[in-house]
RNA sequence: GUGAGCAUAGCUCAGUUUGGUUAGAGCAUCUGGUUGUGGCCCAGAAGGCCAUGGGUUCAAGUCCCAUUGCUCACCCCA
């Protein structure tokens, strides 16, 4: 048996309602904040991600689905959306048409990691990018929109964590200080952290090794070494969040594994999923557009994992649906009625009723059991004595009442059903 | 890439500890319970190479080994 590839999932009809519901909330919140949807290709030139996300990051160095196409060009299934959106932004000169572009997306992403709770190889993210302004209002707006969406879904067990990484120049000064502090402990660091010492020293803060954490507890914090401009930017973000009544906490250890972040970074974590608890993450990326060949345009954005969110919703039972219903089920009482039955079904469907019928030639009892299972409001019996008299029997499945109607009066049948 | 756990009907699971005739249950499916009427109830049916391949044994769903798959966790991320 051929099965779905490791880390991929079928979304079956029974799962579709909750996905549609999630998508409708995403769309309505982004629309309220006047973000416009953008769709970009699922694959891009490999170089886009290598440059945009950073060669040394885990995503680029070990998680991408990269392949050569038939002409020998190296392509990659997108592991995240920001690089592609920025590429499209530059390619279509969106900044020349509008000073600030507020964009959102809902799309599948691909990363070759070992699957676990809340982590798949093909997964879905929604997110937003605001490109063209350095206003801290937008940093806060990202967090607010994500939070509004989670709230609308009924999620409770949430924690907003924010941090500031400052600008590259002040960060370089700080990195030197951090290196000086860590030098005496170097031998005690975990192997992974030793590597990071050279590649991205800030990431040592992310280590969960006990020994590393002990050392990092007294390390100088980036947040205490921010330049004045970064500090006031961060202060404004906090102030806006507070005025929007978004509870948050500052996590000076929150660094994040993508190279492009500057100033604000944030995550919203849920206590209702497994160990992969970040429902969304994002931050400001003021150098990215220029890095990818555009003008020096600032940007900020976030991405949220939809499977993870739905997992949290299920665990919290944050919303539920009524059983799906149909309007009418046609029961064929005797053989030979099929043409009339189907014609009636089509005409009622054209009037807007959800109509189903038997396609398996089953007994009346079996058809009634099916009608009941489908939660139909009405059943229309076709055949027998009444049909011979030119009538059909309409049964209300809630109260069991039945009445006869002229067999060709579609309008009468329609209104008898519609009135209830 | 590393570690641990799991694998029996469409689904959820008994049975494995202490090997012993034809492998069970609930749910779901199907058929009936007087000629043409659902739900609840009752009766019955169908559905399994017990993940795959080797081994131990008189005998393996049960013990051993390998393989594959899944799950969870690490790394990291959404």
Image (cartoon, rainbow, N blue to C red):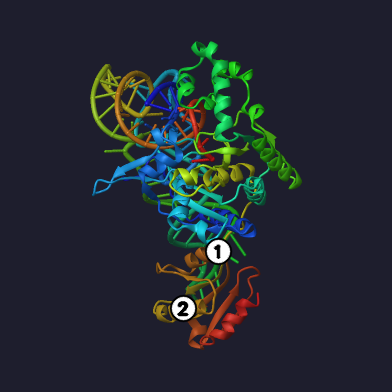
Q: Where residue A79 sits: x, y (%)? A: 43, 43
Closer to the eye: label 1 or 2:
2
Q: Nearer the viewer, residue A227 or A91?
A: A227
Q: Distance between the residues labelled 1 and 2?
A: 21 Å
Q: Quadrant of residue A235?
A: top right
Q: Where residue A282 sits: x, y (%)? A: 57, 42
Q: Where residue A54 sits: x, y (%)? A: 44, 36
Q: Is residue A378 left or right of residue A93?
A: right
The residue positioned 34% from the left and 41% from the top of the image is A66
Q: Read off the residue under disc 1.
A: A372
Give me the disc on residue A346.
Answer: 2
Q: Where residue A379 sits: x, y (%)? A: 55, 73
Mark 2 secondary-structure assignment: helix
10 Å crowding of disc 2: few (<14), some (14-19), many (20+): some
Of all chains, the one bearing label 1 is A
Q: Where does the N terminus of chain A fall, quadrant-wise?
A: top left
């Amino acid at each position: 048996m051929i099965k779905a590839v490791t880390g991929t999932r079928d979304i079956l009809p029974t799962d579709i309602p909750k996905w549609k519901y999630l998508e409708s909330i995403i769309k309505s919140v982004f629309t309220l904040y006047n973000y416009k949807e953008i769709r970009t290709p699922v694959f891009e030139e490999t170089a886009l991600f290598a440059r945009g996300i950073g060669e040394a990051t885990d995503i680029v160095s070990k998680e991408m689905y990269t392949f050569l196409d038939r002409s020998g060009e190296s392509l990659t299934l997108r592991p995240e959306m920001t690089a592609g959106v920025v590429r499209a932004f530059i390619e279509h000169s969106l900044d020349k048409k509008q000073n600030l572009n507020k964009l959102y997306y809902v799309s599948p992403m691909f990363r070759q990691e070992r699957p676990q709770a809340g982590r798949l190889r093909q997964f879905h993210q929604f997110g937003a990018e605001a490109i063209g302004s350095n206003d801290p209002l937008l940093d806060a707006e990202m967090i607010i929109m994500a939070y509004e969406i989670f709230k609308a879904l009924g999620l409770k067990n949430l924690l907003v964590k924010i941090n500031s990484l400052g600008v590259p120049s002040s960060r370089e000064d700080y990195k030197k200080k951090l290196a000086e502090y860590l030098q005496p402990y170097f031998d005690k660091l975990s192997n992974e952290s030793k590597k990071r010492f050279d590649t991205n020293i800030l990431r040592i803060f992310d280590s969960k090794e006990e020994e590393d954490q002990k050392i990092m507890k007294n390390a100088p914090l980036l947040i205490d070494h921010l330049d004045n401009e970064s500090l006031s930017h961060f202060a404004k973000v906090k102030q806006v969040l507070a005025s929007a009544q978004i509870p948050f906490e500052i996590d000076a250890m929150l660094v994040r594994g993508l190279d492009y972040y500057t100033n604000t970074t944030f995550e919203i974590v849920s206590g209702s999923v497994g160990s992969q608890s970040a429902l969304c993450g994002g931050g400001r990326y003021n150098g990215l557009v220029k890095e990818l060949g555009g003008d020096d345009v600032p940007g900020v954005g976030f991405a949220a994992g939809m499977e993870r969110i739905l997992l949290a919703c299920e665990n919290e039972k944050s919303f539920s649906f009524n059983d799906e219903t149909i309007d009418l089920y046609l029961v064929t009482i005797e053989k030979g009625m099929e043409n009339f039955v189907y014609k009636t079904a089509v005409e009622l469907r054209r009037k807007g009723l959800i109509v189903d019928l038997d396609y398996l030639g089953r007994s009346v009892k079996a058809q009634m059991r099916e009608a009941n299972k489908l939660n139909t409001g009405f059943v229309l019996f076709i055949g027998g004595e009444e049909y011979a008299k030119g009538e059909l029997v309409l049964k209300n499945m809630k109260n069991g009442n039945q009445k006869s109607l002229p067999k060709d009066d579609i309008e009468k049948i329609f209104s008898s059903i519609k009135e209830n």
